[in-house]
Amino acid sequence: MTYRIQRLVEERAVVFVCSGELDADHCARLGELIAAEEPSRVRLDLKEVTLADHNGVQCLARLHAAGIALVNCPDYVRRWIAAEEGANR
């Protein structure tokens, strides 16, 4: 699977631009990168994510619940995250 994470620093945020396919392995790496940052400043830009499997969506749901902003999130992923969050209540 092809996946890339690019780190950009903006004035008030650290943005991780994700592209390609998002699975458990890629989420583990993304989690490591986020752990090195102040969570309230982190944003994930998902515009270039082409595919997310169940593990990837669970990871995004956990990050979102922890306060990580998800921007440019594909609609199908946003709906899936909402379903995951609803199932965990």
Image (tube, rainbow, N blue to C red):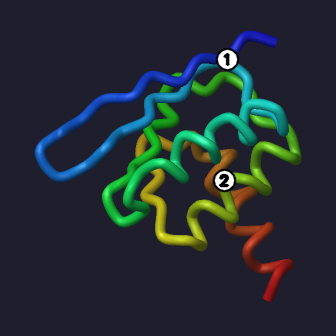
Residue 62: percent from the left, percent from the top? 68, 65
Q: Residue at x 41, y 51 (%)?
A: 37
Side of 2 where 47 appears, left or right: left
Q: Nearer the viewer, residue 27 or 71?
A: 27
Q: CA distance from mark 2 to mark 1?
A: 15 Å
Q: Residue at x 38, y 59 (%)?
A: 38
Q: Amino acid at mark 1?
A: Tyr
The answer to whether 43 is drawn above or below residue 86 in the figure is above
Residue that sits furthest to the front in the current view: 36
Disc 1 element: strand
Quadrant assignment for the N terminus: top right
User: Dot 1, how many residues are within 10 Å of its Cα: few (below 14), some (14-19), or many (20+)?
Assistant: some
Residue that sits furthest to the left in the current view: 11
Write down the residue under mark 2: 60
Residue 49: percent from the left, percent from the top? 61, 27
Q: Amino acid at mark 2?
A: Leu
Write down the residue under mark 1: 3
- Mark carried by residue 42: none
The answer to whether 79 is drawn above or below residue 31 in the figure is below
User: Dot 2, how many residues are within 10 Å of its Cα: few (below 14), some (14-19), or many (20+)?
Assistant: many
Side of 20 where 58 appears, left or right: right
State which tag comes first along the sequence, 2 or 1. Answer: 1
